[in-house]
Amino acid sequence: MTGPDYSYEALAHQNGFQRIAGVDEVGRGPIAGPVTAAAVVLDPANIPEGLNDSKVLSAKKREALYDVIFDVADVSIAHATVDEIDDINILRASHLAMERAVAGLSSPPDHLLIDGNMIPRGLTLSSEAIVKGDSKSVSISAASIVAKICRDRLMWDLAQQFPGYGWETNAGYPSKSHKAALQNLGVTPHHRRSFKPVHNILYQE
């Protein structure tokens, strides 16, 4: 299996774009915690070795790459809160996080490579959506690594304040033990009330 490469970026350069950002989000599936997005502009002359979809990398490899990416690239991370997720729905919230991440880069990119099949409507820059982009484009895989590590650390911090839900290991995903804790310990302010397992507990007869 071949990992991601620079071909999407190279094509964008050929089309006259200079600054190309990869954009990805993590945390659509959890029932607790924010959704987190990252935008990364890599330096074509200094692309970290071993970039890949964050899901196929070991935790140790991800951590090492995270530091390297910050050293050599322009990186921006942003979130959409649990309240925003419940207000506007998870898809819009993940798009909002992406829009915020792009806006946070040190200078605006010319072209965006976005993981998935949709371009967030708030992004007015030249953009293309790439399905499974984190395994095709190194810029998107860099964004996926940064977003995942950042969100995992955030959930680890929240786990210290709300022990018992296992967020330090499940990152807010609805694992069996997380759902059991929800039943036993109740709903925290960090749970997404619009998500079924949480909603059902809040509105049990």
Image (cartoon, helix red, strand yellow):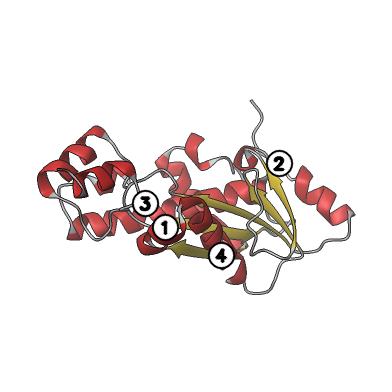
Q: Are marks 4 and 1 in contact (CB under 8 Å)?
A: no
- Residue that label 4 marks: 101
Q: Nearer the viewer, mark 3 or mark 1?
A: 1
Q: Is residue 48 visible?
A: no
Badge 1 density bin: few <14, some 14–19, many ≥20, Cα 10 Å: many
Look at discs 4 and 2 and give the one toward the viewer. 4
Residue at position x 49%, y 58% from top? 93
Q: Are marks 3 and 1 in contact (CB under 8 Å)?
A: no
10 Å crowding of disc 2: few (<14), some (14-19), many (20+): some
Q: Estimate the x, y position of residue 97 in percent, counting from the top left.
A: 51, 61
Tag shown at residue 16: none
User: Measured from the top left, where is residue 148 in percent x and y?
Assistant: 45, 50
In the image, residue 151 lies at what x, y percent? 40, 55
Between 45 and 141, the residue placed more toward the observer is 141
Q: Residues within 10 Å of mark 3 (few under 14, many from 20)?
A: many
Could you say whether the residue bearing mark 2 is in a helix, strand or loop? loop
First in residue order: circle 4 vs circle 1: 1
What's the amino acid at mark 1?
Ile
- Say which element carries label 1: helix
Alpha carbon of mark 3 to alpha carbon of mark 2: how far? 25 Å
Between circles 3 and 4, the one closer to the viewer is 4
Check whether the beta carbons of the residues at disc 2 and disc 1 lie within 8 A of each other: no
Residue 5 point in image, percent of width and height? 71, 41
Could you tell me which secondary element the residue under label 3 belongs to? helix
Q: Nearer the viewer, mark 2 or mark 1?
A: 1
Pointer 1 residue: 85
Q: Which residue is mark 3?
A: 152
Q: Name the residue beneath numbered marker 2.
A: 5
Label 2 amino acid?
Answer: Asp
Earlier along the polypeptide chain: callout 3 or callout 2?
2
